[in-house]
Image: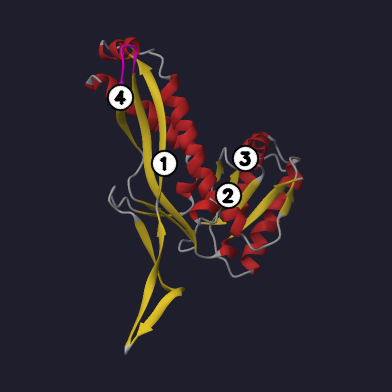
Amino acid sequence: VPDAAWTAIDDTATQVLRSHLSARAVVDFDGPHGWDFAALSLGRVAPSAKGQKGSVSWAAREVLPLIELYEPFALSHHVLQDLARGAKDADLGPVEEAARRIAAFEEQVIYGGLPAAHIEGIIEAANSEAIPLKTEAEVFAQAVGHGVNTLKFAGIGGPYALVLGTDAYKALNQVTRSGQSLEQVIERVTGGHVLWSPAIGGGVLVSTRGGDFELTIGQDLAIGYARHDADAVELFFTETLAFRVLEPAAAIELRKA
């Protein structure tokens, strides 16, 4: 792959990933620790994995293994050659689509969890009752205000970020009775930003005070070479991560009504 093509691929991937990775803006980021970092210590010993032999007792420490993501895509030799010649309009659709898919998976893991990997997501772990969310501007703002009060009454300080799915995010363009946009009203109420995520159906209000949610990265998102044939080069996105909810009370779901 020519250097100019690598640069164009990286730039395209970066643009897509920045616009699709909302969770990194609202949780604590731990890492990157590198490809060899395989598991995160949980600071405990497993109650079922311990014993004693003579005067010596033993116990296995609990760890959370990182999961490894792999998302392949292919670019034709013609596209790579065009990029090497300096083409500005080469078809990098496969890069964009693969970047969206792996970003959506990371978002789903953080918000929705991945039970098979023993990862609990923010929405799944939230221990407050979900708040109904409707798209009418005034009702929408009231739901967010109710969510902020619920978190405050639970002792969870702000600022807060509101993460919305596609349909709810589109509602932000509405104008409220005060003449302000719905987004402006919400940002004033939460003291934080409104973000979009493709992995959420309604929304989730999250405290961004720190210490409540932790994303651990071994290998951060990167692009690698897999193989090639006479027609195309196969590349891939990869990443290793783990996620923990440390304080379930620090988020509340806004469920689409």
**C-alpha span from label 4 to label 3:** 36 Å
Among numbered discs 4 and 1, the one appearing first in the sequence: 1
Which residue has dot 3 on it? 165
Among numbered discs 1 and 2, the one appearing first in the sequence: 1
Identify residue type, mark 3. Answer: Gly
Q: Disc number at residue 112?
A: 2
Q: Disc number at residue 69?
A: 1
Q: Nearer the viewer, mark 1 or mark 2?
A: 1
Q: How crowded is mark 1: few (under 14 residues within 10 Å), some or many (20 or more)?
A: some
Residue 192 versus residue 21 in the image, above or below = below
**C-alpha span from label 2 to label 3:** 13 Å
**C-alpha span from label 1 to label 2:** 16 Å
SS state under label 1? strand
Question: What colouring does the structure picture have?
Answer: secondary structure
Which residue has dot 4 on it? 227
Q: Residues within 10 Å of mark 2 (few under 14, many from 20)?
A: some
